[in-house]
Image: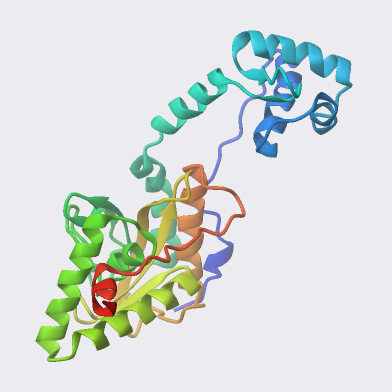
Amino acid sequence: MQQQNFATIPFMTTAPTKQQQGIQSIEVGSRLLRALAANGRSMMLRDLAQSAAMPAAKAHRYLVSFMRMGLVEQDANSGRYDLGGFSLELGLASLARIDAVRLATPILDDLCEHVGETVALAMWGNHGATCVRWIEAGGPVTVTLRTGYVLPLTSSATGLAFAAFYRSAYMKKQIDAELRATAENADTPLNAVIRDFDQQLDEIRRHGIARASGSVTPGINGFSAPVFDHSDRMIAAITSLGTMGHFEMEWDSELATSIKHAAATLSKRLGHGEGEKPAPTQEKTRATKKSEK
């Protein structure tokens, strides 16, 4: 099988936009709004004008209009400018319209085509980590992941991704139950099972992706990378599955890198900060806390 450099493959393509006539003054003034948004805090007029690359007097005229519209507000005491209430309304309305599954579909299509493996999107549902979209790669061996299927948190790649990065009180209870069942079935002390599981989560957080080999379905390997939204909260996981002996399992493999790249692309589309490294959840499982008492 010919090797492909998956890590360099773009996962979203944008069709060229036809040049249309607009209102240049609005486009110029928007530089002030972009500067306020990028700065992350209120700004003095001189700094704001400098960031927007325009004279202070010109910037002030734009700001007066923006304040009338509610896009910008000015602190009466400090004189600093910041984004106004209407800007907040626009931002929240935009976020409310984001459909993770819709945005994920072309990314999953591209990922499946380039890695040649079955890929899926999972989200947290009423019963746990749930497959909401899957794309089968085809080939001599069929690997499927049914829509609506709930994956175990302690043994599947998808479940482990949620266990490492997602936050949910229900998830802690589910992990506790799964670990106890594992300890009983293997006739192993619960503390030992918990210790191994916590070490596994630490490794996942270091690499930014979860993996599992033959634990849910014999002969099937999997990688799963977390997807984050604008609030740095994990909301989904992109997973790829393949057969042992064909599916690469190294942490730094091109396959793993491609899956992480796809997850990062979707995270960016969902508003996650560009270039920021997601802060992993450092909370211990409910079972871990009980064992320490």
Quarter of the C terminus within the rendering: bottom left
Classify 4 as above or below 16: below
The location of residue 234, given as percent across then percent down, is 40, 53
Where's residue 7, x and y in %? 55, 66
Q: Is 80 on the left or on the right of 143, as rendered? A: right
State the residue at coordinates (37%, 37%). 99
Q: Is residue 290 above or below residue 39?
A: below
Residue situated in front as seen by the camera: 11 or 157: 157
Front-most of 111 and 25? 25
Front-lying residue, 154 or 177: 177
Looking at the picture, does residue 213 appear above or below residue 68?
A: below
Q: Determine which quarter of the picture holds residue 213.
A: bottom left
In this rendering, the count of numbered labels is 0
Compared across the picture, whether 293 is left or right of 232 comes to left
Residue at position x 52%, y 77% in the image: 252
273 over 261 or under it: above or below: above
Q: How is the image coloured?
A: rainbow
Q: Quadrant of the N terminus?
A: bottom left
Q: Is residue 273 left or right of residue 40?
A: left
Residue 55 can be seen in this image: yes
Snapshot quadrant of residue 120: bottom left
Q: Is residue 37 left or right of residue 168?
A: right
Location of residue 82 in the rendering, given as x and y in whole percent from the top left corner: 67, 26
Residue 264: image location, x then y, percent? 50, 55
Q: Do we see residue 244 in this rendering?
A: no
- Residue at 50 percent across and 60 percent down: it is 279
In the figure, residue 101 lies in which quadrant? top left
The residue located at (64%, 8%) in the rendering is 68
